[in-house]
Image (cartoon, helix red, strand yellow):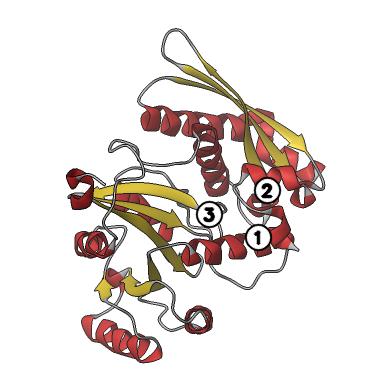
Amino acid sequence: MTEAEQKTRAGFVALIGEPNAGKSTLLNRMVGAKVSIVTHKVQTTRARIRGIAMEGSAQIVFVDTPGLFRPRRRLDRAMVAAAWGGAADADVVVLLVEAHRGLTDGVRGIIERLKERGDGPQVALAINKIDRVKAEVLLALSARLNEEFPFARTFMISAERGYGCDDLKRWLAEQLPEGAWFYPEDQIADLPMRMIAAEITREKLTLRLHEELPYQLTVETERWEERKDGSARVDQVIYVARDGHKGIVLGHGGETIKAIGQQARADLAEFMGRPVHLFLQVKVRPNWLEESERYSEMGLDFKDGD
């Protein structure tokens, strides 16, 4: 190891918590770019998306895990297994708790699981969305949570507004082991662009559509063509479970799919910093939730759903 490498730090930080606790928002805040899907709906993060942030001479690789919840379907079980797998592989774990929801049964379950793991990575507590409650409520919640588990540090943050995030980022950088960086300094995610593009489109579908449909569809980037003018052509397939769902995604006269395509194209072009030509198809695959190939595309292990 060279002298320069000895001065640098690098490691993995897993963000865990209940669905919709703000993990994806915090990841994007730390990295400074949209690398994880953020919506008002729960359970939107399916894969362990790694976002890479620099803090001084430290490289922090964030693992944004699916929200921890009681699994019912194969996809649910695979998502929960991915979440705990991300936590087990990390150097530091950050448990996010929503300030206005407090110590829920779901948070208690996560804490119990952390206790069962024994000598794992140190765990920090981040109470998120602090702008929604009064100071005395925050202090009481912090005290109660620290009675439940010996957190290494407690941070009061608002991932959406940025409050307290810099302090958390500095502390995380200090906890990482010395060593060479894992990625180039200007890289912000280790996901292939094909998967990031699919996640961006799925985010737009989730925001546009309602009820249960978003959890019964998936998006795959089927083709990626780099063009001579510097632009990219991206062909994606939206898989739905039923014929009726196809009509919902397409919308009257194709209005819905057109709007989703425009929004996804704009986000993807901004992310890549160059023009993108996005083409969407909708296909019915009744059993896609039971196909191992679909799980591989999402970065999940099909066997974890057994």
The image's mark for residue 217 is none
For residue 222, above or below residue 114: above
Mark 1: few, some, or many residues within 10 Å (few <14, many ≥20)?
Answer: many
For residue 175, above or below residue 97: above
Residue extending furthest front? 1
Q: Classify mark 2: helix, strand or loop.
A: helix
Q: In the figure, is residue 111 to the left or right of 181? A: right
Q: Badges 2 and 1: C-beta atoms under 8 Å apart?
A: yes
Taking the spot 49% from the left edge, 70% from the top edge, the residue there is: 18
Taking the spot 36% from the left edge, 45% from the top edge, the residue there is: 182
Foreground mark, 3 or 1, reads 1
- List the residue tagged with mark 1: 78
Tag 2: amino acid = Tyr
The image's mark for residue 295 is 2
Taking the spot 45% from the left edge, 67% from the top edge, the residue there is: 16
Whether residue 67 is visible here, answered yes or no, is no
Query: Of the residues under marks 3 and 1, which one precedes in the sequence?
Result: 3
Distance of mark 2 from mark 1, alpha carbons? 9 Å
Q: Position of residue 194 (x, y in %)?
A: 54, 32
Classify residue 184 by image quadrant.
Answer: top left
